[in-house]
Image: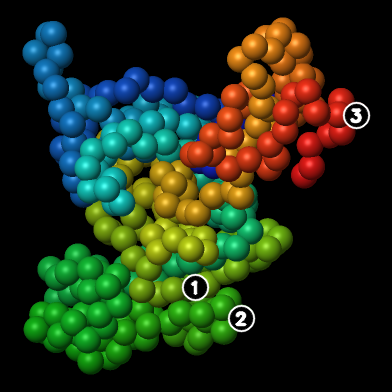
Amino acid sequence: MSFAPDLFKPEETVAFGLRALYRGRGYTCFKMSKFEEYDLYVRNKDFLVSEGIITFTDTNGRLLALKPDVTLSIVKNSRADAGVQRWYYNENVYRVSESTHAYRELLQTGLECIGPLDRHQLCEVLSLAAESLALVSPDCLLTVSHLGLLSSLLAAPPLAAVKQSVLACIGQKNLQGAAQLCRQAGADEDRLQALLQLAGLRGGADEVLPALAAVCPAGTPEGEALAELTDAVRAVEAVNGIALRLDGSLVGDMRYYNGLIFQGYIKGLPAPVLSGGQYDPLLRRMGKTGRAIGFAVYLDQLERMDHRQDFDVDTVLLYDPADDPGAVLAVARQLAGQGHSVLTATRPPAHLRARRTVSWRQWDAKEAPHE
């Protein structure tokens, strides 16, 4: 028996497609419990998308939390001796929704790649992020940056002390505020101008990459970051239909992120539906070795799109209460067997939009419902 696509919510249909994509690229499904020990999340709360965590006390006295995140659980269960570990997940998380500002159970799909990663795996994950975004909607945009372009400028004194505050200003595209913080910290003008130049670059790859090459010479940390970014960008450009933009103001918390960082948008939604990056520092914070990169697709965002159709049901099949129920249902089954939805009723329902309304006695068995 086949099922019509409209039997599923848009986010469910997308989730099926994403799972097929990840399985086809050698990723294994990661399954987890609905809850973890609260301590896992409170120690890494800055890594979480939402601050709200729902907690409860287990029967043995342990404080547990309904999971607001999947990445932390995957990292916790990763093994240093297992080589490159490729996981995908399709899990419900429990967090404060951006749209309702209330706790919600939200469906989230994503993947993580952890272990002794080389540049090929980094490019693979970014390419899969692009493919995932295109699967959600063909009208999409992937923005990409690399924290290695800024890290060396912010790692040394005196800017190390204000690094997170400067990154927050850059992320808000407040370069004037970032400059003020740097000057107050005592940064020299050359370093400040280099920082502002890198943070202010945004546009297509053909425009931005040459500009970065002029200020990120080979053999430097910035040059290595640029080489990684260039390879990743070329991998994404091979994904048909994806629009790509490099954005120096796309930043994250350097206590957790250190390399490629990216966000995906689709037309009609102001917030990103995909977000990810390289998070080697998180592994070290959790006592793990190696490198890690991953992303999540926020399927709850799709609920905010307009998925309305022109109809609720294909055919309303009218009958009289005195009619033979078996004969009416036979016609209804015949219609449904053609893959169309059918509703039997004594009068046209006022709250439903139908493609057609017809009496079961007048219906021509040779006539298929119109598309």
Q: Circle 2 sits in a helix, a strand or a loop, which is it?
A: helix
Q: CA distance from mark 3 to mark 2?
A: 58 Å
Q: Position of residue 262 (x, y in %)?
A: 45, 60
Give the quarter of the figure containing the N terminus. top right
Disc nearer the start of the sequence (3/2): 2
Image-quadrant location for residue 348: top right
Q: Position of residue 306 (x, y in %)?
A: 50, 54
Q: Residue furthest bottom?
A: 189
- Write down the residue under mark 3: 366
Q: Give the residue at mark 2.
A: 206
Lower position in the chain sequence, tag 1 or tag 3: 1
Residue 75 x, y percent position in the rendering: 36, 34
The numbered dot on residue 261 is none
Cα distance between the residues tagged 1 and 3: 57 Å
Which amino acid, by three-letter code, is at mark 3? Lys
Indicate the amino acid at tag 2. Asp
- Residue at image mark 1: 246
Q: Is residue 47 left or right of residue 18?
A: left
Taking the spot 72% from the left edge, 20% from the top edge, the residue there is 332
In front of the other: label 1 or label 3? 3
The residue that appears at 34% across and 55% down in the rendered structure is 257
Residues 181 and 132: in front is 132
Considering only vertical position in the picture, is 173 above or below 301? below
